[in-house]
Each structure stands twice: as structure tokens, then as C-alpha cells.
């Protein structure tokens, strides 16, 4: 029985590679039909429970490329959707052992999504990027979370959310007039989530927010474009630092203004 295991693994790997190459051929063809091209760096392929759905749109401004870089042991779940604005300059980087779970949607609208090693986009997440979205090692979004990146959103190593978090680095400059709100100017400011910061369920993080390392953001909090200290519990709507975590308090850190 044990002698058959290498043979079984070889067959499994061959089937996975064939499925991946079939999916890549379809992706390449759909991009080409809309005047775009694929730049592929994926020597290890991509394992998926079900072929990711493709939605290639004739939108975007850029060089008409999708650069797809995939590390070793990357996995997608079922019913994952990849949307690409074919006219843009799009990048999807998936680091070693990163994964995307069932029913997630990744939308590249002339932007980049970069997942570091072991980073994750979990079940039913929606990620849209027209800017630079980066997740460090083991960073990620939990079930049902939404991220819209127009300029830059960074999750440093080990930073991540619980369920249903919303992270958006842009807003419309609504002036109270009759102009349709989607036709109003778009205001953007980068978001930066420090290393090992935990964001609890139902948190909303808006443009310009910066959170230091090792912080905890309480459930249902709204962080509205301010700088928040590392090593503190941050809570409320609007949010503010409410209590230093034990190691921070042990350093006699002064309370933030």
C-alpha cells in the first residue's frame, strides 16, 4: 500500500497541473479577446477545488496586462471569481501557501493584490483594487469581509480581521447638491494596519486610517481616518484608544492624545 502512495501523488499532481493549464488557457484567451495579455510566473501551478470563474471586462486604463505570480502550495476553494478590467495594469501575486476560500471575489480594476506567504482571503470576501493592496505573512481577511482599495491598503505581517470587516480607502466628496453621488470627486488616502493587529467583527476602517502594531480593534468600531497607537485596545464609533494592552501598560506608556 505504501509503495502506491508516490504513484497516487504523481497522478494527483498531474491532474492538478492539467486543470491549471486548462484554466490558464481560458484566461489567456479571454484576455486576448479584449485586447489584453497574460504575464505568467507560476512554476508550481495552482490547486483549486473548482476552476475559478472569470469575468473579463473591457474597462480600465493602463498597458492591458494581467501579471499572475503564484508561489508553491497555493490553493483556491470553490466558486472563486476573478474579475479583471482588461485595459488596466493588473497584478495578482499569491505567495507560498496563501489561499482563497469558497465564494470569494477578487476584482482587479487596474490595480495590484499581493498576498504574502500563508496570507488568506476567506469565505465570501469581496476584494476590489484599483491601487496597491498588500497582505504580509499570515495576514488576511476573514469571512464576509469587504475591501475596496483605490490608492493603497497595507496589512503588515500577522495583521487580520474577524468576520464582516469593511476596509475602504476612498469616499465620494458629496457636497449636498443634486449631482449624483457616484459622479462626485473621489477622495483617497492610504490605510495601514500594523503588524499583528487584530480587527474584530463588523469593524469599519475608512480612508487615511493608520493603526500601530499589536493593537486590538473592538467589534463594531468605526475608525475614521486617524492614527491609532499600537499596543492598545481601540473601540467605539468613532473609535478611540481606550486601554493599553498588558505589555504596553507595563512599559508605563503615556495615554495617546
Image: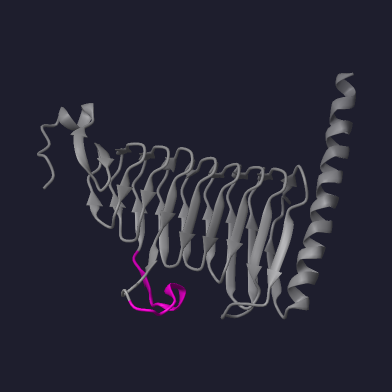
Where residue 219 sits: x, y (%)?
Answer: 36, 37
Where residue 122 sits: x, y (%)?
Answer: 57, 42
Q: Vertical placement of 59 versus 143: above or below? A: below
Q: Vertical placement of 60 versus 219: above or below? A: below
Residue drawn at x 32%, y 43% as measured from the top left: 221
Single out the residue that lies furthest toward the front.
178
Where residue 213 sits: x, y (%)?
Answer: 30, 43
Single out the residue that lies furthest toward the top.
1
Residue drawn at x 80%, y 58% as measured from the top left: 23
Q: Is residue 31 magenta?
A: no
**Magenta stretch, residue numbers:** 177-189
The one nearer the camera, 162 or 222, is 222
Q: Quadrant of residue 154?
A: bottom left
Q: Is residue 178 magenta?
A: yes
Residue drawn at x 56%, y 81% as measured from the top left: 61
Q: Is residue 163 left or right of residue 109?
A: left
> What quarter of the picture does the N terminus occupy?
top right
Q: Is residue 136 left or right of residue 207?
A: right
Where residue 156 sits: x, y (%)?
Answer: 40, 48
Amino acid at each position: 500500500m505504501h509503495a502506491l502512495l508516490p504513484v497516487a501523488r504523481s497522478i494527483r499532481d498531474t491532474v492538478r497541473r492539467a486543470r491549471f493549464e486548462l484554466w490558464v488557457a481560458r484566461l489567456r484567451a479571454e484576455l486576448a479577446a479584449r485586447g489584453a495579455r497574460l504575464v505568467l510566473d507560476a512554476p508550481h501551478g495552482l490547486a483549486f477545488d473548482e476552476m475559478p470563474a472569470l469575468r473579463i471586462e473591457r474597462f480600465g486604463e493602463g498597458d492591458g496586462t494581467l501579471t499572475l505570480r503564484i508561489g508553491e502550495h497555493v490553493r483556491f476553494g470553490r466558486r472563486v471569481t476573478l474579475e479583471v478590467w482588461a485595459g488596466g495594469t493588473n497584478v495578482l501575486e499569491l505567495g507560498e501557501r496563501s489561499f482563497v476560500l469558497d465564494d470569494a471575489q477578487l476584482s482587479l480594476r487596474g490595480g495590484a493584490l499581493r498576498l504574502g506567504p500563508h496570507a488568506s482571503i476567506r469565505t465570501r470576501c469581496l476584494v476590489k483594487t484599483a491601487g496597491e493592496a498588500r497582505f504580509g505573512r499570515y495576514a488576511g481577511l476573514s469571512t464576509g469581509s469587504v475591501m475596496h482599495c483605490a490608492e493603497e491598503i497595507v496589512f503588515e505581517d500577522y495583521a487580520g480581521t474577524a468576520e464582516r470587516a469593511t476596509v475602504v480607502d476612498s469616499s465620494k466628496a458629496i457636497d449636498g447638491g443634486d449631482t449624483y453621488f457616484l459622479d462626485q470627486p473621489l477622495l483617497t488616502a492610504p490605510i495601514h494596519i500594523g503588524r499583528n493587529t487584530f480587527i474584530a467583527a463588523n469593524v469599519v476602517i475608512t480612508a487615511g486610517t493608520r493603526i500601530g502594531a499589536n493593537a486590538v480593534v473592538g467589534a463594531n468600531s468605526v475608525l475614521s481616518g486617524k492614527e491609532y497607537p499600537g499596543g492598545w485596545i481601540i473601540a467605539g464609533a468613532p473609535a478611540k484608544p481606550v486601554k493599553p494592552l498588558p505589555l504596553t501598560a507595563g512599559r508605563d506608556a503615556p495615554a495617546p492624545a
